Amino acid sequence: GKKGFIFDLDGVIVDTAGFHYLAWRNLADELGFEFTEEQNERFKGVSRVRSLEILLEIGGVKATEEQKEGWLVSKNEEYLSYIAKMTENDILPGVLKVLTYLKEKNIPMALGSASKNAQPILKRIGLFDLFDCIVDGNHVEKAKPDPEVFTLGAEELEIEYTDAIVFEDSIAGIQAANGVDMVSVGIGDAKVLHEADYNFNDFTEIDTAFLDKLINA
Ligand code: B16
Ligand code: MG
């Protein structure tokens, strides 16, 4: 059937992981424990609420629901202040070339992100209008590795799940795509993303021959 492409946002189109890390680290600081960049790996593709749970686990901090609510709000406010400064220069290398190529070929494209801030980020970097549909943390109940964010995207693009090609930087996202027999393309370290059908370090390694192969499969 007709193919469609679904892109994760953080770690695939932009690198906002560093901003999430800064904001979480400042909260850890405030709560009196250390939070390293290595520990931040576990936060990729994971929802905001789950991220806070993991952080508090790391710090051995017990908290009331009210405290957690407050921290989620203040962390997000800090994160928003970082993304407010983003521009199209923050689009990761090679991404624009791939997206433009697919757009010219009229290939249906969706965004599939766990982030509730996906829409403002896409507006900041000038890619909001490029996607036929945007599925993000505001639209789904279940987080990756549950495939909901991708299955909803495929349904909105009106393609079969098996005709969807998913670009992901997180293990949870690759597992989500594989779980419903979508084609998974890992962006990042192949050792980490070894479950993916294909793997690239970044988009500069992706050429039109590869895209044509996926489109015509
Ligand atoms: P927010 P993705 C994910 O984005 C991030 O990888 C993850 O670190 C973050 O916790 C999650 O979005 C929620 O983000 O706080 O903005 O709602 O990789 O699924 O595009
Ligand atoms: Mg990601």
Image (cartoon, rainbow, N blue to C red):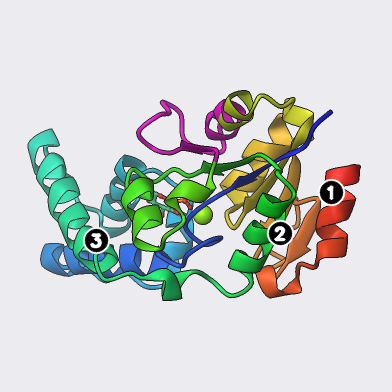
Q: Is residue 202 visible?
A: no
Mark nearer the N terminus (1 vs 2):
2
Residue where numbered disc 2 is placed: 101
Q: At 61% from the left edge and 51% from the top edge, which residue is drawn? A: 171
Give the extent of the magenta segment: 132-152
Q: At 53% from the left edge and 61% from the top edge, which residue is drawn? A: 13
Badge 1 amino acid: Leu
Residue 79 is tagged as 3
How crowded pointer 1 is (Cα within 10 Å; few <14, some 14-19, many 20+) is rated as some
The stretch drawn in magenta includes residue 149: yes
Q: CA distance from mark 3 to mark 1?
A: 35 Å
In the image, 180 versus 111, the foreground residue is 111
Q: Is residue 65 visible?
A: yes
Badge 2 amino acid: Tyr
Quadrant (top left/top right/bottom left/bottom right) for the N terminus: top right
Above or below, comparing residue 98 to residue 197 in the picture:
below
CB under 8 Å between callouts 1 and 2? no
Badge 3 amino acid: Tyr
- Label 1, secondary structure: give it: helix
Side (left or right) of 133 relative to 158: left
